[in-house]
Image (cartoon, rainbow, N blue to C red):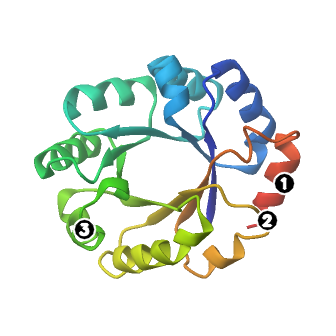
């Protein structure tokens, strides 16, 4: 399973500093919305300049202006972008087509999906390269998450990534699901020692 650290703080300077510390452990970085909202395309450019061999996934969550937005993101250095499942089908398809022409990739964020099963079923035909499913914050909602996972996994052969705030102690229960990757928020950007935290997750 691929472990992907999320950079989810507004400070670009601090994010780059953390990334420098944990880079030896990971091949992919996920730039979350606080970093993108605060710094725009400059954050993507800086990450790609500093880490040219690292795959950069941008939490763009596109819902419209797919051609314009994707051009900005890809020219800045994004390798993967995200689109919301609730976006119109023609938007998702157009975005995926634009990405394919540039040898880039698109992940569908299932957070706002009316029917996770239906979106998962149609994702490949729309041109998507994978799906993101969010782990709930509350322990009480875990059963719902596993139901959602079953609906997604049962309706697609595409890679599925989990996004959430999981500890090393609890990650084992997700390993049994065999996700393609786990995008982990907060654990690295809020750690006293990001490097030590990275070493704990790298074993998975």
- Location of residue 171 in the rendering, given as x and y in whole percent from the top left corner: 70, 69
Point out the residue furthest to the front here. Answer: 140
Choose between 108 and 138: the one closer to the eye: 138
- Location of residue 154 in the rendering, given as x and y in whole percent from the top left corner: 34, 82
Q: Which residue is mark 2?
A: 203
Give how far apart the Cα atoms at labels 3 and 1 are: 37 Å
* Secondary structure at numbered mark 3: loop
Give how far apart the Cα atoms at labels 2 and 1 are: 7 Å
**Residues marked 2 and 1 touching at CB (< 8 Å):** yes
Give how far apart the Cα atoms at labels 2 and 3 are: 34 Å
* Secondary structure at numbered mark 2: loop
Q: Which residue is mark 1?
A: 199
Occupied quadrant, residue 172: bottom right
Choose between 108 and 112: the one closer to the eye: 112
Dot 2, how many residues are within 10 Å of its Cα: few (below 14), some (14-19), or many (20+)? few
- Decide which of tag 3 and tag 1 comes sooner along the chain: 3
> Which quarter of the rendered picture does the C terminus lie within?
bottom right
> Depth-wise, is mark 2 or mark 3 nearer the camera?
3
Occupied quadrant, residue 2: bottom right
């Amino acid at each position: 399973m691929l472990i992907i650290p999320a950079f989810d703080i507004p400070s670009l300077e601090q994010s780059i500093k953390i990334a420098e510390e944990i880079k030896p452990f990971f091949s992919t970085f996920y730039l979350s919305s606080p970093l993108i909202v605060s710094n725009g395309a400059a954050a993507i450019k800086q990450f790609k300049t500093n880490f040219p061999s690292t795959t950069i996934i941008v939490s763009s969550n596109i819902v419209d202006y797919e051609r314009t937005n994707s051009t900005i993101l890809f020219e800045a250095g994004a390798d993967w972008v995200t689109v919301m499942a609730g976006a119109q089908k023609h938007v998702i398809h157009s975005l995926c087509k634009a990405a394919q022409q540039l040898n880039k990739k698109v992940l569908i964020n299932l957070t706002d999906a009316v029917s996770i099963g239906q979106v998962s079923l149609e994702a490949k035909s729309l041109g998507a390269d994978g799906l993101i499913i969010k782990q709930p914050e509350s322990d009480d909602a875990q059963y719902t998450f596993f139901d959602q996972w079953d609906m997604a996994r049962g309706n697609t052969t595409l890679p599925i990534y989990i996004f959430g705030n999981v500890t090393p102690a609890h990650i084992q229960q997700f390993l049994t699901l065999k996700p393609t990757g786990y995008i982990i928020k907060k654990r690295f950007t809020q750690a006293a020692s990001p490097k030590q935290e990275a070493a704990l997750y790298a074993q998975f």
